[in-house]
Amino acid sequence: MTSGGNHLSDGREFRRVLGHYPTGVTVVTATCPGGPEGLTIGSFTSVSLDPPLVSFCPGHDSDSWARMRAVGSFCVNVLADDQADLSSTFASRAGDKFREVTTRVEATGAPVIEGCLAWIDCRVETVHTAGDHDIVVGRVVALGTADGASESASGPLVFLKGGYGRVAGL
């Protein structure tokens, strides 16, 4: 184990060091006036059981989040480990991210992506500004696991050290 470390001098070092911590990969979706929107999020977490709250942290520079913010509801789609292509699509600034994606809607009307491991449908409870991101807290109104996850998926998609991976031993 090494001791000491580099002082924080720029965002690259911050990203490199925090890249040693694996994150689950989700796609957060909403139905906006101009059509469905979605963005890849690695900062999703459970916040509270009573009331049921979750959160995610979109960047201020996200065009998708800018359109989604005023809607007041969203769905978190937990990606399976064979859905890295979906993560890449929704992380891009592509025009129609939903072109080849099959969805349905649940309680809030936000798109639920077919084949994901789980989905959490929410209404926005509050949004806090934190540096170059927002912290969005949502109240869960419906949730479930997907029976339609593909046969090749064995668990959740994770992101570690700049790449996608699988959780071993599930």
Image: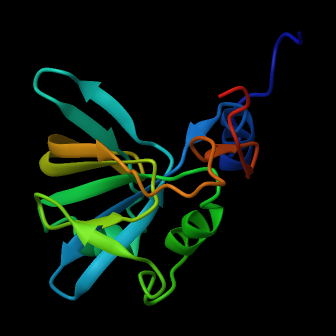
The answer to whether residue 8 is seen in the rendering is yes
Q: Is residue 162 above or below residue 40?
A: above
**Residue 43 percent location from the top left of the image:** 46, 43
Q: Quadrant of residue 21?
A: top right
The answer to whether residue 129 is seen in the rendering is no
Of residues 151 and 130, the one nearer the viewer is: 151
Q: Residue at x 59, y 41 (%)?
A: 155
Of residues 127 and 77, the one nearer the viewer is: 77
- Quarter of the image with the N terminus is top right
Q: Is residue 161 above or below residue 63?
A: above
In the orientation shown, which residue stands out farthest toward the right?
2
Color encoding of the figure: rainbow
Taking the image as shown, residue 87 lies to the left or right of residue 111, namely: right
Q: Quadrant of residue 154?
A: top right
**Residue 84 percent location from the top left of the image:** 64, 61
Taking the image as shown, residue 63 lies to the left or right of residue 47, namely: right
**Residue 24 percent location from the top left of the image:** 54, 41
Q: Is residue 20 above or below residue 165?
A: above
Q: Residue at x 58, y 38 (%)?
A: 23
Q: Quadrant of residue 145?
A: top left
**Residue 51 percent location from the top left of the image:** 10, 26
Of residues 125 and 12, the one nearer the viewer is: 125
Q: Total number of numbered labels? A: 0
- Quarter of the image with the C terminus is top right
Q: Residue at x 16, y 45 (%)?
A: 142
